[in-house]
Image (spheres, grey):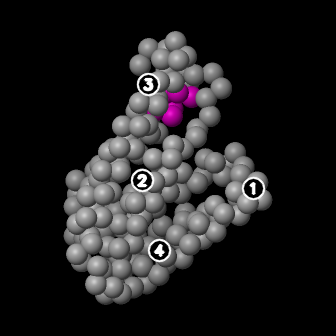
């Protein structure tokens, strides 16, 4: 849950053009997420609260970070809009299923996890580039295109899953 704690400081650091500090704080948040996930899986430490807070932390970090990066001119606005649209689709679908499908539990799809990973990888490369830590300029456009493709594929998969669950429960889409 370190991501939730780090979101505001990372956004403020990006806004202040303190890119090295933002990059290293982002890196610390990402590594703590990996460690948290490993510990939860290794020791069966998954809780219902963690199952809800983890995707909220992911969405808060990605949206906040990409909004800040957009405001400093580092990423295109249409990509931020795509991320927000996907997240709204997922949340809207989950709320719809919760009220209409008995026993519905929120479970992330593998493509959703891949999407978050690729988005954050792209954000990390953008931050690293802005910070002057690595010359990754040539990788930014291919990573953006990959992030777009995975984001669109993820949105389509969640939409298809929602429609499938609604159909299986006898509810109209």
Residue receiving disc 2: 115
- Taking depth in this image into account, of 26 and 37 the one nearest to the observer is 37
Name the mark on residue 163. 3
Label total for image: 4
Seen in the image, is 103 located left or right of residue 43? left
Residue at 23 percent across and 66 percent down: it is 141
Magenta extent: 93-98
- From the image, state whether disc 2 or disc 4 is nearer to you: 2
Residue 59 in view, yes or no: no
Residue at 29 percent across and 53 percent down: it is 148
- From the image, state whether disc 1 or disc 4 is nearer to you: 1
Q: Are marks 1 and 4 in contact (CB under 8 Å)?
A: no
Please report whichever mark, 1 or 3, sits nearer to the chain's N-terminal start: 1
Name the mark on residue 45. 1
Please report whichever mark, 4 or 3, sits nearer to the chain's N-terminal start: 4
The x and y percentages for residue 35 are 64, 68
Please report whichever mark, 3 or 2, sits nearer to the chain's N-terminal start: 2
């Amino acid at each position: 849950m370190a991501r939730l704690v780090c979101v505001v400081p990372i956004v403020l650091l990006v806004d202040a053009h303190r890119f090295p500090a933002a990059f290293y704080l982002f890196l610390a948040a990402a590594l703590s997420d990996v460690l948290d996930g490993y510990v939860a899986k290794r020791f069966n430490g998954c809780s219902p609260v963690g199952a809800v807070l983890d995707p909220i932390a992911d969405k808060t970090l990605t949206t906040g970070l990409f909004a800040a990066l957009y405001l400093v001119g580092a990423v295109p606005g249409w990509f931020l809009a795509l991320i927000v649209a996907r997240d709204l689709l997922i949340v809207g679908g989950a709320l719809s299923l919760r009220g209409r499908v008995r026993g519905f539990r929120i479970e992330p799809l593998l493509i959703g996890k891949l999407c978050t990973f690729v988005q954050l990888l792209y954000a990390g490369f953008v931050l690293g580039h802005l910070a002057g830590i690595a010359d990754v300029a040539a990788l930014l456009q291919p990573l953006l295109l990959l992030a777009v493709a995975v984001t669109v594929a993820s949105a389509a998969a969640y939409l298809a899953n929602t429609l499938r669950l609604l159909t299986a429960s006898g509810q109209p889409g």
